[in-house]
Image (tube, grey):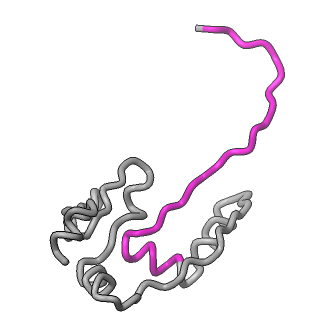
Amino acid sequence: MINEVIDSGYTIRDIADPFSGKTWAMVSDKMFGSKQSSGLFDVDDFVEYIQGNNIFPNLSEFSEYSARNYDDIANILSDPRRQRYINEGKFHFVVKHRNIPIRGRFLAL
């Protein structure tokens, strides 16, 4: 089974929190860029999974929120599920700006 896991592309990576300096080992599916955190698994959880024990909770539906100020953002992030991901260092928050047309003349530099 170990060879099958290695052949499938999974590897163990050392992850570092740039703010605290804390490091830990995670199983990685070798994705990169903004998707790299979605393919990280706790080593013990991954071992349970490949042994046939599906211990990972089903993902909730994709949610999109509109926030107009800091309080709106704090309220969204206060959800217990999001707090767990934040505390585990696994939360990804995307800020998407609306396209607002700007009229006027601009000086090209």
Q: Residue at x 24, y 78 (%)?
A: 43
In magenta stretch: residue 88: yes
Count of picture labels: 0
Compared to residue 82, the image places residue 57 above or below, namely below
* Residue at the spot 32% in from the left edge and 62% down from the top edge: 29
For the point 26% across and 69% down, which residue is it? 27
Residue 101 falls within the magenta-colored stretch: yes
Q: Outermost residue toward the left?
A: 3
Q: Nearer the viewer, residue 94 or 67?
A: 94
Picture layout, residue 102 above or below residue 98: above
Principal secondary structure, stretch drawn in magenta: loop
Which residue appears at 64% of the width and 61% of the height? 70
Residue 8 position by quadrant: bottom left
How far across and down, in percent of the image, does residue 23 sit?
20, 67
Is residue 74 left or right of 28 when viewed as pictured? right
**Quarter of the image with the C terminus in it:** top right
Location of residue 38 (image quadrant): bottom left
Q: Which stretch appears magenta?
A: 82-108
Q: Is residue 27 above or below residue 48?
A: above
82 left or right of 50 in image: right
Q: Residue 81 versus residue 29: which sits nearer the camera?
A: 29
**Position of 10 compared to 38: left or right?**
left
Where residue 81 appears, as percent x and y from the top left, is: 53, 82
At which x and y percent is residue 56? 43, 84
